[in-house]
């Protein structure tokens, strides 16, 4: 049996599998979208923050307030499934960086100099509720869900541990809640903008555990381009989406 014949058979099986899978999904959902986008992240935790004596309030979810100098980048990809016009479900993978530093906080004055950068990947499952018909125009929405984390911390400057180093990879979980907006489009490309808090179940996203074991969290803002791979909605003679 030739290699070409085997390769053709494998390709045919894959194509058949994707076709069956696509038909199965279309049976249960009226819309399927591919998600791709970029975003920014900000860490809230035990390291850094602004100097509360000068620039702001110290307590925020039991963590130091935000340091905009430590804003980092995130990428987003995923898929969204919609059964009706006001509710959808999405699965998203978000690789990102988190960063924090004591250099602009009161801890630098006290002699603590700690900086870190965390490489993190989050796989999240979100339910999204749209406060207006998502098919006919601008629609704000709220979302909530949970995610799984894989992360590794690199100590870029460290007076809290023996040597600057990268930790091994750890696993964790997040609870996610946020708000967003979906913008109208006359094509099958739709734009969304959302922001949300990601509450983690660990106190080690920054590589530093405190005696009080306060959980770290991060804030993400994302701009996403959503491509409608499948759409069963149609307009009737009155211009209403069915």
Image: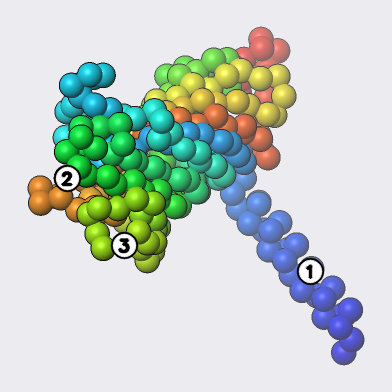
Residue nearest the viewer, comparing 119 with 22: 119
Q: Which residue is labeled 1 in the image?
A: 11
For the point 34% across and 30% down, which residue is it? Answer: 67
Please say if the residues under marks 3 and 1 sit with CB atoms less than 8 Å apart: no
Can you say which quadrant of the picture contains the C terminus?
A: top right
For the point 79% across and 68% down, which residue is it? Answer: 12
Q: Residues within 10 Å of mark 2 (few under 14, many from 20)?
A: some
Where is residue 24 shown, x and y percent of the image? 60, 53
Residue nearest the viewer, comparing 209 with 195: 209
- Callout 2 secondary element: loop
- Callout 3 secondary element: loop
Indicate left or right for 192 with 162 as reference: right
Q: Is residue 54 above or below residue 102?
A: above
Whether residue 179 is visible, yes or no, is yes
Q: Is residue 194 above or below residue 115?
A: above
**Number of numbered discs on residues:** 3
Residue nearest the viewer, comparing 69 with 93: 69
Q: Which residue is labeled 2 in the image?
A: 214
Q: Which residue is labeled 3 in the image?
A: 163
First in sequence: mark 3 or mark 1? 1
Q: Is residue 28 above or below residue 190?
A: below
- Report how far apart the C-alphas of labels 3 and 2 lie in the structure: 24 Å
For the point 49% across and 21% down, which residue is it? Answer: 181
């Amino acid at each position: 049996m030739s290699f070409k014949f085997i390769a053709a058979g494998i390709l045919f099986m894959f194509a058949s599998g994707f076709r069956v899978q696509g038909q199965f999904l279309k049976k249960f959902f009226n819309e399927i979208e591919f998600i791709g986008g970029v975003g920014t992240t900000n860490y809230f935790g035990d390291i850094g923050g602004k100097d509360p004596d000068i620039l702001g309030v110290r307590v925020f979810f039991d963590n130091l307030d935000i340091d905009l100098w430590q804003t980092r980048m995130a990428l987003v990809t995923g898929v969204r499934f919609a059964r009706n016009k006001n509710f959808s479900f999405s699965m998203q993978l978000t690789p990102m960086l988190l960063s924090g530093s004591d250099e602009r906080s009161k801890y630098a004055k006290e002699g603590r100099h700690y900086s870190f950068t965390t490489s993190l990947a989050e796989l999240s499952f979100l339910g999204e509720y749209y406060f207006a018909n998502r098919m006919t125009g601008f629609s704000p929405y709220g979302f909530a869900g949970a995610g799984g984390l894989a992360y590794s911390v690199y100590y870029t400057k460290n007076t809290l541990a023996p040597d600057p180093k990268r930790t091994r990879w750890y696993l964790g979980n997040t609870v996610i809640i946020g708000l967003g907006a979906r913008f109208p489009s006359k094509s099958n490309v739709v734009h969304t903008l959302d922001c949300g808090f990601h509450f983690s179940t660990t106190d080690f996203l920054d590589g530093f555990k405190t005696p009080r074991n306060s959980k770290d969290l991060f804030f993400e803002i994302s701009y996403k381009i959503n491509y409608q791979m499948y759409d069963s909605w149609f307009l009737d003679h009155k211009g209403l989406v069915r």
